[in-house]
Image: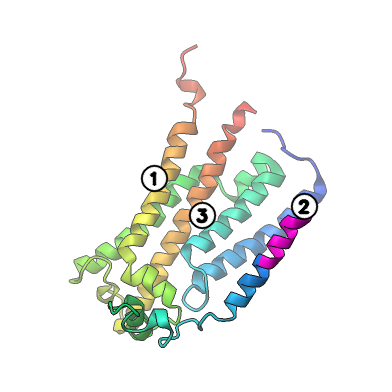
Amino acid sequence: MRLLNDDPITLLVSRFLSPFIMLFGLYMIFHGHYSPGGGFQGGTMLAASFILMRLTSGITIAQLQFNSALAAPLGALGVLIYFGTGFAAMVFGGNFLDYKFLPLAGLTGAELRAMGILIIEVGVGLAVMAILTSIYDNLLGDPDDA
Amino acid sequence: MKWINFLLLAVFLALMLYAATGLSNRGDASAPMNREFSPAGTPNAANFYIHNAYKDAKTPNIVTVVLADYRGYDTLGEVAVIFTAGLICYLILCKPRKNNETP
């Protein structure tokens, strides 16, 4: 429950930078179809923005941005989105991870594949973001001991 | 002796830049490593991906299609590995709560 760093300049700069890093991470995830990027890279950028706030503002403020109790459920949710997409394709008549059989109305085969790739990229990004933040929190230790 | 290191680095950089000018374009199906058969005569998978990736998934980025569609099972394994690594960090590093300990 103590501040790691009381310097207002680093706090202000990181508060300014963190949303932009987050925005760029989202751009990397959702623009992965057209440019280098994708779930792993975008998730790492999102985790970088969280860890920047954790480095500069101390534990109590950073918990408001991303509560470390959320990390494990969100990571599991990301893996479940990926697995569930593959499993839904299997339930609706195709092979595992064959996105052509996803039950999305109004899309034909190739567009369904593009949509399936987008869904699993979101799942990958969510899992990578939550897990990297959770590894940092665990390495830092219990905040109440400080 | 330090300038020898810098000299070697500069020569290596120049060599790399010179080599980079000879690389083929991305997704060039007529480049030697992307032809249907390699110079040794074995069939080449890259040619199939270049010709079919956009047709199959309407996605211009071939790498994304290979990563998430053709090799989706592999990427599922990668995500599972990252998730397992996070869980193991939690299990090893997290101490039990205070109120569970008997004084």
Residue at the top extreme, as displayed: B103
Q: Distance between the residues labelled 1 and 2?
A: 45 Å
Q: For the N terminus of chain A, give its image quadrant.
A: top right
Q: What residue is disc 3 on?
A: A129
Where residue A34 sits in the image (x, y, percent)?
Answer: 50, 79
Q: Can residue A82 be seen in this view?
A: no
Q: Tell me the kind of residue under disc 1.
A: Thr
Q: Which residue is drawn at 20% across and 66% down?
A: A91
Q: Which residue is drawn at 42% across and 39% down?
A: B88
Tell which tag, 3 or 1, sits nearer the viewer. 1
Q: What residue is disc 2 on?
A: B2
Q: Compare residues A67 and B63 and report the one nearer the observer.
A: B63
Q: How is the image coloured?
A: rainbow
Disc 2 is placed on an element classified as helix
* Sequence-wise first label, 1 or 2: 2
Tell which tag, 1 or 2, sits nearer the viewer. 2
Q: What residue is disc 1 on?
A: B84
Q: Against A52, is B58 above or below?
A: below
Q: Name the quadrant containing residue B41.
A: bottom left
Specify whether B83 is left or right of A23: left
Say which chain tag 1 marks.
Answer: B
Residue at the left extreme, as displayed: A93
